[in-house]
Every structure is written in C-alpha cells, then in structure tokens.
Amino acid sequence: MIIINVKDGESLDKALKRFKKKFEKTGVLRELRSRQAFEKKSITRRHVIKHAIYKQNMNLETAV
C-alpha cells in the first residue's frame, strides 16, 4: 500500500503528483499488463534486443 502524507498548505495536485510518481516506481501497472498475456522468454528477449538496437541507432543519428 502506498501512503502519501499531505503536508500543511500543500495543494492536492502536488500530493497527487507525488502519489503517481511513487505508484509508477513500484511497477504495479507494468506488472499487471505483463501478466495479462503470457509471453515466451525468447519473444521477450527479442523485444529487448530490438529496443536496444533502436536506441543505439537513435544515439548514432544524434551524434552525427
């Protein structure tokens, strides 16, 4: 359970923003989405490699 202490005089928007940031760091939503459909490890590895290649190409384009 995520607990956010709202400080005196703090706006609700700021407290909500802190809550969202903490919630994102826990990775609950990411975990839930990954469990919705089973994905083989070979396919997961393939996605990771494709993403790494994409990032590497982006870094090369910005350097040139």
Image: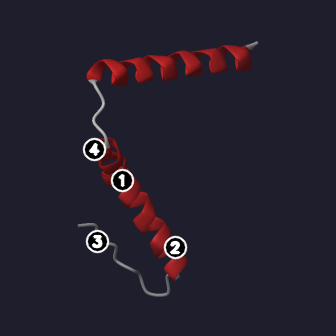
Residue under the point 39% across and 80% down = 6
Residue under the point 47% across and 72% down = 16
Q: CA distance from mark 2 to mark 4?
A: 31 Å
Q: Which residue is mark 1?
A: 29
Sequence-wise first label, 3 or 1: 3
Q: CA distance from mark 3 to mark 1?
A: 17 Å
Secondary structure of the residue carrying tag 4 is helix
Q: Nearer the viewer, residue 14 or 34?
A: 34
Sequence-wise first label, 2 or 1: 2
17 over 26 or under it: above or below: below
- Numbered mark located on residue 1 in the image: none
Q: Nearer the viewer, residue 29 or 5?
A: 29
The residue mark sitting in front, 2 or 4, is 4
Q: 10 Å neighbourhood of mark 2: few (<14), some, or many (≥20)?
A: few
The residue mark sitting in front, 3 or 1, is 1
Sequence-wise first label, 1 or 4: 1
**Quarter of the figure with residue 44:** top left
Q: 10 Å neighbourhood of mark 3: few (<14), some, or many (≥20)?
A: few
Residue under the point 43% across and 23% down = 47
**In the image, 13: left or right of 27?**
right
21 over 33 or under it: above or below: below
